[in-house]
Image (tube, helix red, strand yellow):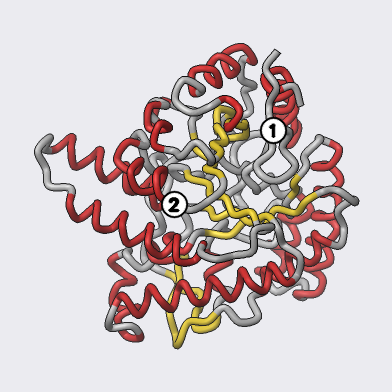
Amino acid sequence: MTEFTNRTTSPFRYDIVGSFLRPAELKAAREKFAQGKISQAELTAVEDQAIIKLIKEEEAAGLKAVTDGEFRRSWWHLDFFWGFQGVEKATLAHGYHFADEETRPETVKITGPLTGDHHPFVEHFKFVRDYVSKGTQVKQTIPAPAQFLEEFLRPENQANVKQFYVNLADFDSAVVKAYRQVIQDLYDAGCRTLQLDDCTWGISVNAFANLKKKDPKADVSELQALQERFLKVNNATLANWPADLTINTHVCRGNYHSTWAAAGGYGPVADTLLAQENVTAFYLEYDSKRAGGFEPLTKVPNDKYVVLGLVTSKTGKLEDKETIINRIHEAAKFHPLDKLCLSPQCGFASTEEGNILTSDQQWAKLKLIQEIAQEVWGK
């Protein structure tokens, strides 16, 4: 019988991406707060109780690294951006365009020099840290630096960033510095597992696929240059942290109210993201044909882990166990089985709207993932 490495740090053989469906009482409290009917303190009290309950549910489900479900956020990424100094919440004429829906039209506006001082997510981490059981790790999820840059590639936002950073290299440096400040503060608070959520690569493969569809001989040099910029900023943020800080990344193609934003296999980003980004593990969406095949996994260095997102978080229908096991072994033809793990393809609620499934279905998915992991890796 094959002996597999016993995972004691992230990623674990059965794992999560981060977000969970918001309970009804939390949604109601957030709505009341938005209407001015309750105070921030009253909302925080509801958030606190919901997170404490979730932590216990995660531990009961056998998860070895838990999150706060992103219960204090409206968005998986924008709330983090709004926590920087020199940034404000802003509204545009349109939201992000997904396959079946347009999101709320919220975004980020730069108002001054960007810094990571006193970021509220540090306190959010401390709260979870203080409520987990002994031996349970806390996974802090934040959007990747590249994702912050992507927000300012939106046509409506390009002029704003140039008001304060005429030279984009200076902007990129400021982003890296701000991120490193937040990560240092998280580390000082005890964070040892950090996940950078990053849809920029999904956007890139979508752009590549669309360009090639229009013209197979199309020039993709601009897309390649953008990938290099994203990689440079992410790796500068990842550089020279203590060895006991594990930093992973999650890549998907959009997750909003069970719909998606992008399509295309990982091939166009394999030589940058998969081959060169200096993370411990890649959490990769693989729940649909939109994600392509496993062949690009050959670009992942053999010392890095791939967490296969083979179980969808977008619907409540439970996957067939044998089908998932067969797909894991198929992926193992391109990356060592000992370096593979299993998770949902994304969170269950990347935004507070949540995906279209029930809480019971959400937990059934995680139970299935645990059962499959135990059958494949024996732990």
Of residues 162 and 103, the one drawn nearer to the viewer in this rendering: 162
Other residues around mark 1 within 10 Å, as few (<14) / some (14–19) / many (≥20): many
Of residues 117 and 231, the one drawn nearer to the viewer in this rendering: 231
Residue 179: x percent and y percent? Answer: 53, 71
Amino acid tagged 1: Tyr
334 up-or-down from 259: above or below:
above
- Quarter of the image that includes the N terminus: top right
In the rendered image, which residue does mark 1 sit on? 14
Residue 209: x percent and y percent? Answer: 25, 38
Of residues 295 and 23, the one drawn nearer to the viewer in this rendering: 295
Badge 2 or badge 1: first in the primary sequence: 1
- Horizontal placement of 250 versus 295: left or right? right
In the rendered image, which residue does mark 2 sit on? 277
Q: Residue at x 64, y 58 (%)?
A: 243
- Horizontal placement of 234 versus 311: left or right? left
Q: Residue at x 82, y 70 (%)?
A: 42
Amino acid tagged 2: Glu
Nearer to us of marks 2 and 1 is 2
The reply to whether the C-beta atoms of the residues labelled 2 and 1 are less than 8 Å apart is no
Q: Quadrant of residue 211?
A: top left
